[in-house]
Amino acid sequence: MRTNAKEIANEFDAIVVGSGFAGLYMLYRLRELGLRSRVFERGHDVGGTWYWNRYPGARCDIESFDYQYSFSEELLKDWVWTERYASQPEILAYLSHVADRFELRSDIQFGTTVRSMVWLEEAAHWIVKTDDGSTSTARFCIMAVGNLSLIKRPDFEGLGDFQGEWYHTGMWPEEGVDFSGKRVGIIGTGSTGIQALPLIAEEAAQVLVFQRTPNYSMPARNRPIAQDERQEVMAHFRERRRLCEESEAGTPMPAPTAAATEASEEEIRSRYETGWQRGGISSLSYAFSDFFTSEEANKTAQEFARSKIREVVKNPEVAEALSPEHHIGTKRTAVDTNYFQSYNRDNVTLVDLRRTAFERVIADGIRTSGGSYQLDVIVFAIGFDAMTGALLDIDITGRAGSTLREVWQEGPVTYLGLVTAGFPNLFLVTGPGSPGVLSNMVLSIEQHVQFIASLVDHMQLEDLEVVDTSEDAEAGWVAYVNELADQTLYPKASSWYLGANIPGKPRVFMPYVGGCGRYRRECDEVVSNDYRGFFFGANAGADTPEGRA
Ligand code: NA7
């Protein structure tokens, strides 16, 4: 496809899409390399997922000390986290501080959605069109669009008739929502619904939770960070970060060695209880090494988690309805403060959609097969078209007119979760096939951005204009990612990791389950083997990877 040169208003070396954790750091590194860069951001400020998800209770489930950048000593010194798990406003304030501190905003165009990207072979650059009608070009494009950024649309029958207010948690209004005195319906009991319920219940007159599938949730045991704790942690920060980098999930927890299948009942109970008192997402999963691989081992943790629900929820029928059955950890485990406790409140009612089917939204509420519920507000906590949604929402056309939508029709294919064949000079930050969503995102983002920046630097030094991967390299990677996943229980659950939450989406297990440490070592090996699996072209259009795998 050709574009009239007159239409091109803005020429850049690099375009970054998104200004969350990934986009901000990418811009910082591109500037260091001396590249003229532009970030396009849909939101009106920085923050990415933390900009949009302002619902009550939104909070990180990775400890604040680990959920921060590590690239700048000065930044580490001048930011003080106040809680063990940072709230959405605090994370947003942090990202805003990062943008100010490094004067990043001048290269970010806010309120701008990228509509299409086309690779022009002859010029060896991307042509990027945005919804303000302008066209830009760039040699490199970096997709920092986030894994949980395209919301699952609430296409519930009858929603257009609803006379009350409704909100999706992933597009929460900046001014907040006043629930006082209102009857509120929450649809969805993933991490988001689980975080939101306790706060909404404190404010609203009545809350009805419409639950399709119960979910496991671990106690956060959130607390303020005392000054001496901060000093102690930050004094050893580099060591802690190194542990994170070598770990599976990007946290400093030591990997478990004991197997539940070889442990006594007392030991099992005691380890789970210790984890439960510690709190956090890995409360149970870090007790035993076979948690994610053995059905028998996993069952012991499921039973423990269900016993905790029964201990907390006073009404046994409600406790039963809230008890999940899937393999624990195979759908994202939530982390909560007072979620199950909320069901003991007089103003909270569980509507179990497995017993009474959802029929439609009506003018004054929701109708199920068991009756109608009157509501003033509906909160949709129904999740995202995760991992591929935001990428495929943009018309991306690579070599020989191939579109990303066509190439990924049967599921995403990438090499290292970073690049996809036929889309030269296009990088994905924490794309499908990387550990991203199964890990501490900020840690994975830093590693990806550093990888991409080093690759771009290498190309500049070697005078290479184009980089691509081969279909063979990515087929090998995809097979490897699947092979790793198949050794675990992950693919058994109907999760968003598998695309199962979006009707019609191909069911392919997308994340790399091998862990951050292993993935990092594999990436380092690729680099030390002359960027094995990547192919470079010295001149525009002169070199393509076909037949060279
Ligand atoms: P999730 O984890 O995808 O959860 C969405 C919830 O919404 C889940 O309980 C779904 O039930 C429910 N849902 C979705 N569609 C419907 C319909 N049509 N009817 C009833 N219920 C529905 O999204 P979250 O926002 O909670 O969390 C996303 C990630 O953000 C999380 O994993 C963390 O990584 C941070 P289902 O299970 O599909 O039956």
Image (cartoon, rainbow, N blue to C red):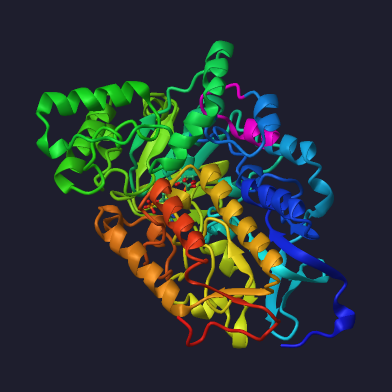
Dividing the picture into quarters, in which one does residue 428 lie?
Answer: bottom right
Q: Nearer the viewer, residue 7 or 528?
A: 528
Q: Is residue 85 magenta?
A: yes
Q: Is residue 122 left or right of residue 329?
A: right
- In what quadrant of the picture does the N terminus appear? bottom right
Q: Which quadrant holds the C terminus?
A: bottom left
Residue 351 spot, x, y in % from top left: 37, 42
Between residues 256 and 2, which one lies in front from this camera angle? 256
Where residue 80 sits in the image (x, y, percent)? 64, 23
Q: Residue at x 57, y 56 (%)?
A: 451
> Does the image show residue 156?
no
Judge whether residue 281 can be spotted in this image: yes
Q: Position of residue 49 (x, y in %)?
A: 60, 47
Q: How many marks?
A: 0
Q: Is residue 52 above or below residue 93?
A: below
Residue in the image at 61% along x and 62% along y: 455
- In the image, is residue 425 part of the stretch drawn in magenta? no
Q: Is residue 273 above or below residue 434?
A: above
Q: Which residues are magenta?
A: 81-94
Seen as rendered, the residue at the extreme right is: 6
Q: Where is residue 523? Give x, y as percent.
A: 47, 57
Q: Quadrant of residue 37?
A: bottom right
Q: Is residue 236 left or right of residue 175?
A: left
Would you identify the image quadrant in which residue 50 lies?
top right
